[in-house]
Amino acid sequence: MENKRGSWGSNIGFLLAAIGSAVGLGNIWGFPYKMGKSGGFTFLLVYLFLAIFVGLIIMASELALGRKTRKAPIAAYKAVSSKYSWLGWFAVLSPFLIMTFYSVLGGYCIYYVIINLIGLFGGMPDGSSFGAMLTSIPASIGVLLAFMAICFVIVAGGVSGGIEKFNKIGMPALFVMLLIIIVRALTLPNAVEGLKFMFIPGYAVAGGFIEEAPNLITVLGTAGGQMFFSLSLAMGAMITYGSYLGKEENLVKNSGIIVAADTIVALLAGIAVIPAAVANGINNGIPVNEIKLNGPGLLFKTLQDVFHNMGALGGVFGVIFYLLVLIAAISSAISLMEVLSAHFIDKAAENGKTLERKGVVLKVSAVITLIAILVAADGLGENGFAPAALLKAKVAGWNDCWLDFFDCWSEGIMMPLGAMLMALMIGGEIGPKVMLDEIHNGEHSPFFSKFYRFCVTYIVPAVMCLVLAGQLTDFFGNQIVSYIIAAVCFIIFSYHTLIPDWKKIDK
Ligand code: PFF
């Protein structure tokens, strides 16, 4: 029967799919430059702290919530909480909004694989290809459609027949390609400057890359936002993937493996990307503070220049690199699409109806594509109809272009708020024991129980409040107002969680 819930073929298949969801553009693009711009080593330490005390906890919670309820996010939250039953909507809306731009970026990867392939036969493209692609609306939309078609085929293939299968081949291939790129990057003259930028405390400023390192609170906000996005948390993905997992699988171990693998790949990606970009800049006489290490420019402009300048084999490395980024983008995008598709399939099943997976995935893909076409045509604000241009008012980053607009709602607001509320729900409403029972499935580890209770009750809500403030500052600019809004949200929801009869008191 088509509407029967899928399940993973094996635990390793699940792990590769979950790692595939986590490893994406966030690792290869976001992590390296955020690490560099946030003072390198300090960022790394903060990131590791957050991954262990917050990421691991939310990862185990999401997997447990999915497996306990065997449902997609909306139904899963409804099943465990009366106060936060609506939270599932965040976990469905966010993936939808993320997909509207993630798919466009995925399309860009296809474009770059193609131009590098063509470059193998002469006329290797350079960084100027980026501007040309952004302003060519048919090209941007064409590659978007191709990316969505690939994702459609995989997700329509089912949980084990499509998603698991793709990741079983894709993840090991990605790893091997990453190693090849690392070896090439580190053998470029001056690559060591890039390593210093990443790993020596204070070198980003001392080496002249940036003027001033951000303060610790800003680093915490940046690292927290990055960690959540990178681990695919608070977007329903891990709840949905957990819902297909067997009761006998060890959730603590699985969560640890996913968090560790994602962090290792992020670091490896940094080691591949930053030294190459820095070395190429220095070797071509560009002052270090002018080497573009952040934003889309790093991936699609700076690195294309690197491959352009590599000589005869540049095209080969270009193809390998953009192919690996493309695999990472696909493996993440399919998890976002699965959240949406699972929601409709489960909802129909609840009403006793049978929905064919293919049809559901087709509709989900079509709606995403319609909105993504706007993002693609906008070309990161290059083509004159970004929200800021339409409103004739530019405020910090949220309305620069349609990509930033959708990112602001999903990654900027719903993700940190959703994670904060999830922790309040577990710590204050349903109680950590309910989640721990599922995480341990009957068999308790006293150490993890204590660690989980402490983190979910105190550390996660507090850190998420700071991350929310950091994200709001990033998108809207005013730090003081952002902190006040985050604190007000925190207080209101803590009150809402802790007062048992809120509704009665209201009346
Ligand atoms: N983790 C992905 C990345 O690092 O690019 C992005 C992502 C995928 C976020 C799936 C959220 C999600 F549910």
Image (cartoon, rainbow, N blue to C red):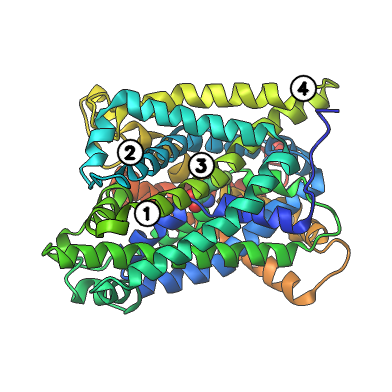
> Which label sits in the foreground, 1 or 4?
1
Asked whether disc 4 touches disc 2, contact meaning CB atoms under 8 Å apart, the reply is no
Label 4 sits on residue: 355
Whether residue 82 is visible, yes or no, is: no
Q: Is mark 1 within 8 Å of ligand 1?
A: no
Q: Is mark 2 within 8 Å of ligand 1?
A: no
Q: Is mark 3 within 8 Å of ligand 1?
A: no
- Marked residue nearer the N-terminal end (4 or 3): 4
Label 3 sits on residue: 414
Question: For mark 1, does the 10 Å Cα neighbourhood hold few (<14), some (14 to 19), or many (20 or more) residues?
Answer: some
Label 2 sits on residue: 398
Residue closer to the observer: 197 or 453: 197
What is the secondary structure assignment of the residue under circle 1?
A: helix
Count of picture labels = 4
Look at the image and tell me in which quarter the N terminus lies.
top right
What is the secondary structure assignment of the residue under circle 3?
A: helix
